[in-house]
């Protein structure tokens, strides 16, 4: 078993800056947890407190039911992969991976078996006799992961391990981490500022801001039911469209005024709003770009926009447009859904009509910015 439990964990630095506020989280055995958030949100600090590299100011951290607050990193049975690889430049790949095993005075044949097995899993067998300077960034990161693997630790901690790689290598390494997780089947805590990594890797995601947990949930839960406006805008690319508007209830039905068009809320969402006792009120409306559809002038629920920028992303277009009330809106539409003539019309200055359905809308309280349906 390798459970991790953080209870009321807080970190305050000497200058009275609070980096982490009252952090509470239970991580199950063999779960892959991702801490995600913008720079300075406290995610790496929290990871370093679990590792023992950062002293906690208050609270307790347990690994496998044992409080580890006062244990040195080497005694916590954790393995950590750093952003900058932290390889010894004068040692070969083999010796880098074997380093921690030699410190434990492990037998040479056991060291050989562990190192070669990890190298085979990571596809770096042919590099075992090379020095780190002869490797690419992706290969160096595999060596760093291999060094963590051979320790056979209860918990793997990974601090933005892919942030120094280019986009192509990040995609490749992300897939390899997914496969690696299945092979070694340990508990993972992974830190990233990249929401794509968070969504594709995590069993659960911990979204953080300014040292606070904003939401904990599965990738699907966090994407489809963001707890607040910060999570809604942070998760998803391009980010969610946001509009100050009024949610109206008339004759038991709900409507919103959006970009000059009155849009009805579908029955399921309407029932959920009614169950919460929500009446007519000022709200913040959120709609993801992929949920907005190109329409036509005759559609009573559509509204007119003028294209500012059209980004052709290959499989889809990201259309940045201005509504008649001068509000910016982003529309994400699949390339295959458009005819050649329609694609040619998506030019700067041209007018388009767009619409969206009531079931894809998100409603946030104007004061607290909390999701009205969570």
Image (tube, grey):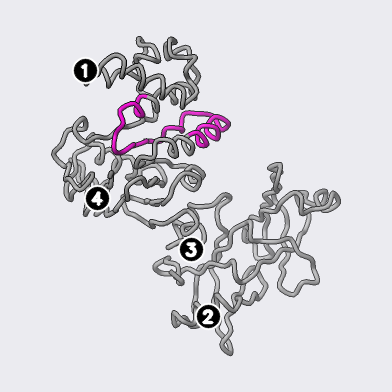
Tell me the distance, in whole angstroms, between the alpha carbons under discs 2 and 1.
Answer: 65 Å
Q: Magenta segment, which residues?
A: 147-176
Vertical position of residue 280 compared to residue 305: above or below: below
Q: Is residue 163 a member of the stretch shown in magenta?
A: yes
- Judge the density around disc 3: few (<14), some (14-19), many (≥20) Cα neighbours within 10 Å: some
Q: How far apart are marks 1 and 3 (CA)?
A: 51 Å
Q: Quadrant of residue 116?
A: top left
Gap in Å between the C-alphas at discs 3 and 2? 16 Å
Q: Please tell me which residue is depicted at 36% across the width and 29% down the height of the picture.
A: 149
Are the residues flagged by discs 1 and 3 in contact, CB closer than 8 Å?
Answer: no
Q: Nearer the viewer, residue 195 or 76?
A: 76
Q: Position of residue 62 (x, y in %)?
A: 21, 46
Indicate the quadrant containing the N terminus: top left, top right, bottom left or bottom right.
top left
Q: Mark 4 points at which residue?
A: 6
- Counting residues from the start of the chain, the first of labels 3 and 4 encountered is 4
- Which sits earlier in the primary sequence, circle 3 or circle 2? 3
Q: How far apart are marks 1 and 4 (CA)?
A: 33 Å
Residue 249 location (% of width, % of height): 55, 84
Q: Residue furthest left?
A: 70
* Label 2 or label 1, whichever comes before in sequence order: 1
Q: Is residue 356 above or below residue 74?
A: below
Q: Label 2 vs label 4: CA separation?
A: 37 Å
- Mark 3 near mark 4, Cβ–Cβ under 8 Å? no
Quickly name the residue at label 2. 271
- Asked if 266 appears above or below 54 in the picture, the reply is below
At 41% from the left and 24% from the top, the residue drawn is 118
**Mark 3 lies on residue:** 225
| Residue 326 image offset from top left, x and y in percent | 64, 61
- In which quadrant of the rendered image does the C terminus lie? bottom left
The residue that disc 1 covers is: 105
What SS does tag 2 mark? Answer: helix
């Amino acid at each position: 078993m390798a459970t991790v439990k953080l209870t009321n964990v807080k970190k305050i630095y000497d200058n009275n800056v609070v980096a982490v506020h009252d952090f509470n989280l239970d991580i199950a055995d063999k779960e892959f947890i991702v801490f995600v958030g913008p720079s300075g949100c406290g995610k790496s600090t929290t990871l370093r407190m679990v590792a023992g590299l950062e002293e906690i100011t208050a609270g307790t951290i347990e690994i496998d039911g044992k409080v580890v607050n006062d244990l040195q990193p080497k005694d916590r049975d954790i393995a950590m992969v750093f952003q900058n690889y932290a390889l010894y430049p004068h040692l070969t790949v083999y010796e880098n991976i074997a380093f921690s095993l030699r410190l434990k005075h492990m037998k040479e044949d056991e060291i050989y078996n562990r190192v070669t097995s990890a190298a085979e899993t990571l596809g770096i067998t042919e590099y075992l006799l090379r020095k780190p300077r002869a490797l690419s960034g992706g290969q160096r990161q595999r060596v760093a992961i291999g060094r963590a693997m051979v320790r056979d630790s209860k918990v793997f901690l990974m601090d933005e391990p892919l942030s120094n790689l280019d986009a192509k290598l990040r995609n490749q390494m992300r897939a390899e981490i997914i496969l690696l997780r299945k092979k070694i089947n340990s508990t993972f805590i992974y830190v990233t500022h990249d929401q794509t990594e968070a969504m594709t890797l995590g069993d659960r995601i911990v979204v953080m801001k300014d040292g606070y947990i904003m939401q904990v949930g599965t990738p699907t839960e966090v994407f489809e039911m963001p707890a607040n406006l910060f999570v809604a805008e942070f998760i998803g690319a391009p980010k969610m469209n946001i509009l100050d508007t009024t949610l109206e209830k008339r004759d038991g039905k709900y409507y919103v005024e959006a970009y000059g068009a009155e849009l009805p809320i579908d029955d399921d969402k309407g029932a959920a709003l009614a169950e919460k006792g929500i009446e007519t009120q000022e709200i913040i409306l959120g709609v993801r770009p992929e949920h907005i559809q190109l329409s036509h002038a005759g559609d009573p629920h559509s509204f007119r926009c003028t294209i500012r920028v059209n980004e052709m992303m290959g499989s889809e277009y990201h259309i940045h447009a201005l509504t008649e009330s001068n509000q910016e809106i982003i529309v994400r539409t699949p390339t295959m859904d458009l005819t050649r003539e329609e694609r040619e019309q998506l030019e700067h200055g041209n007018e388009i009509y767009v619409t969206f359905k009531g079931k894809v809308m998100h409603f946030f309280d104007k004061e607290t910015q909390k999701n009205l349906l969570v």
